[in-house]
Amino acid sequence: MLPEFELLMPQTLPEALDMLAEGAPDVTPLAGGTSLLVDMRGGLRRPGVLMDLAGLSELHAIRQEDGHVVVGGGVTIAELLESPIIAQQASVLRDGAAVFANPLVRNRATLGGNLVYASPAADTAPPLLVLDAEVELMSKEGSRRVPLEDFITGVRETIRRPDELLAAVRWPVSSPHSIGAFHKLALRKADAISVLSVAVMVEGNGSGLPSPHRGGGGGEVYCQQARIALGAVAPRPIRAHAAEEVLRGQPLTPEIIAEAAHLSAESAAPIDDIRGSAAYRQRVVEVLVRRLIVSTERRR
């Protein structure tokens, strides 16, 4: 049973920000409620005042502007799956959305809520990290943009202030030579928390063209830019920066890919729990990173 609470239902974003400014830190924003309401039923959280964000049309848009894709914080996971913009410009995020919980949850859960809840296993976080996403935090006093990598600071911890809402997530449109891939490993195919997840984004130098940074002839694909993100293997979703640096400017040879995969595993700091051991997670990170990078090369 849910504990008693007061419910605020703003009709516009400015009204919501006013309510939040007046009531913070006692007002808790409610988006889809797929995590918050479960915690309340379990006695883990007892907020006295909830503010329902479902009616705020300003938080529900998916658009392209100024060379960026912008997704409102209130966009549901199901809406991500239906969006032609996401399919065209962020297939790696679409792949993450496709394995998010189950259809009923996807119809309610929001992108902003998934990030604000700050689970180390958040399915949307690794794809967004390799897209180089940032979040827009909005309060009555104004707005600020923060790289997603800096937004989540630990288990259930973010830098969001009590008077702020996560209004949008944005990232630059990827190069046409960029290919992303995502894989979630779980104990069953649906409605399961990640044992671990991996996302990669590799930007090549074109179709077999010589690298402008290195000598040599054509026919070999060089990595101009790479991003690798890991979920459920640290207190927060993380980037594997050392692995990315190894790939940058290099030909995608089996040796280079194997080194990047090994460094990705070394960047992880997993724990033992009921879903898997730390050693298992670290080993599988190496395997999945290697496979995903190879898969991006084969799709060129």
Image (spheres, rainbow, N blue to C red):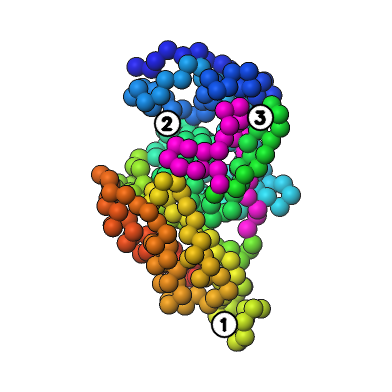
Which residue has dot 2 on it?
35
Could you give the CA–CA distance between mark 1 and mark 3, rounded to whole angstroms?
A: 51 Å
29 vs 111, nearest the viewer: 29
Percent position of residue 80, x then y: 54, 42
Bounds of the magenta segment:
150-174
Percent position of residue 298, x then y: 48, 70
Q: Residues within 10 Å of mark 2 (few under 14, many from 20)?
A: some
Disc ID at residue 139: 3
**Residue 220 in the image: above or below residue 299:** below
- Identify which amino acid the numbered label 2 is placed on: Ser
Q: Residue at horizontal 32%, vertical 56%? A: 281
Residue 271 painted magenta: no
Note whether residue 87 is visible.
Answer: no
Could you give the CA–CA distance between mark 1 and mark 2, rounded to whole angstroms?
A: 49 Å
Which residue has dot 1 on it?
219
Which mark sits nearer the N-terminus, 1 or 2? 2
Callout in the foreground (1, 3) = 3
Which mark sits nearer the N-terminus, 1 or 3? 3
